[in-house]
Amino acid sequence: MPKITRQPAARAKTSVATKAVKAPKKAAIVKRAVTPKTGTPKTAKSKPIKSKSVKSRPWTAVEVREAFSRFRAANPEPKGELEHLNPYTLLVAVVLSAQATDAGVNKATRALFPIADTPQKMIDLGEETVREYIKTIGLYRTKAKNVIALSEKLIRDFGGVVPRTRAEIESLPGAGRKTANVVLNMAFGEHTMAVDTHVFRVGNRTGLAPGKTVLDVELELERVIPSEFMLHAHHWLILHGRYTCLARKPRCELCLINDLCRWPEKTLA
């Protein structure tokens, strides 16, 4: 009899212990099942909320004309800041300015251009010597190679003269669409629009010529800017982006077109 009495007692204890152990697991299961329904955020799987881009009202033709009239009144004859002696040295300077500042290029070319202002003179210097002159500029090794190569191509294919079409300029080593547009505009007076980082920023930030690519902005600017302003338009926009519509801290209080600008974060004070 004592043996029979102990056995039920042992089973009772085991049963209670089992319930005590299983209880938290059931609670945990219930909690996990409820969590998604209550909307509790899951940090590991949560996705960042993307802000919707606000499309600003396009500039009217009257507003565009007003903006460039102000630019012209403030600076009737804007000049590019790349120093050069002729179309050839302008071409070289623009090629050297890729991923570099105008000031940095000018510092290097002030000694180079007086002794190499033609394709043949540049070739006579040789790639190694050209490298020494421009070694303070980023990517100077590649650029020196391109300068010699484009000089050779100018002599071989164009009689040593800078060509006057975009396609021909773009065919030169180191020269792209922006280079062609700058040369055509500054050397030959063509109504081209060279879009650098400053012009791209101004076009998008102000809403004057929004675009996802440099080409988008270029074509839109050419479409909206009246012909009478196109000769100097790219200089006005570059200078505006370089000295007023700065990338990090735009100087809205000094902006000539503050009241026309569509940028939602502009300051008027």
Image: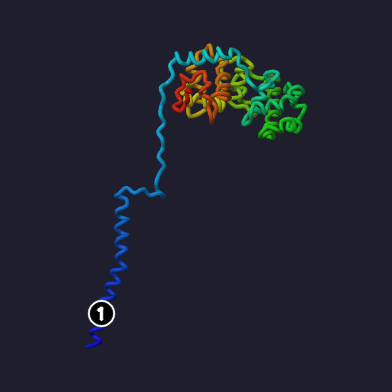
In the figure, 101 relative to 188: above or below? below
Residue in the picture at 71% in, 22% down:
155
Crowding at dot 1, Cα within 10 Å, few <14 / some 14-19 / many 20+, comes out as few
* Residue 189 shown left or right of residue 222 in the figure: right
* Residue 105 shown left or right of residue 1 in the figure: right
Quarter residue 76 falls in: top right
Badge count:
1
Q: Position of residue 15 (x, y in %)?
A: 27, 73
Residue found farthest to the bottom:
1
Query: Does the image show residue 145?
Result: no
Q: Position of residue 139 (x, y in %)?
A: 66, 34
| Quadrant in which the N terminus appears | bottom left
Residue in the picture at 69% in, 28% down:
147
Residue found farthest to the front:
269
Q: Nearer the viewer, residue 140 or 239?
A: 239
Q: Amino acid at mark 1?
A: Ala
Query: Does the image show residue 30?
Result: yes
Residue in the picture at 30% in, 66% down:
22
Q: Position of residue 108 (x, y in %)?
A: 71, 28
In the picture of the structure, the residue carrying the numbered disc 1 is 9
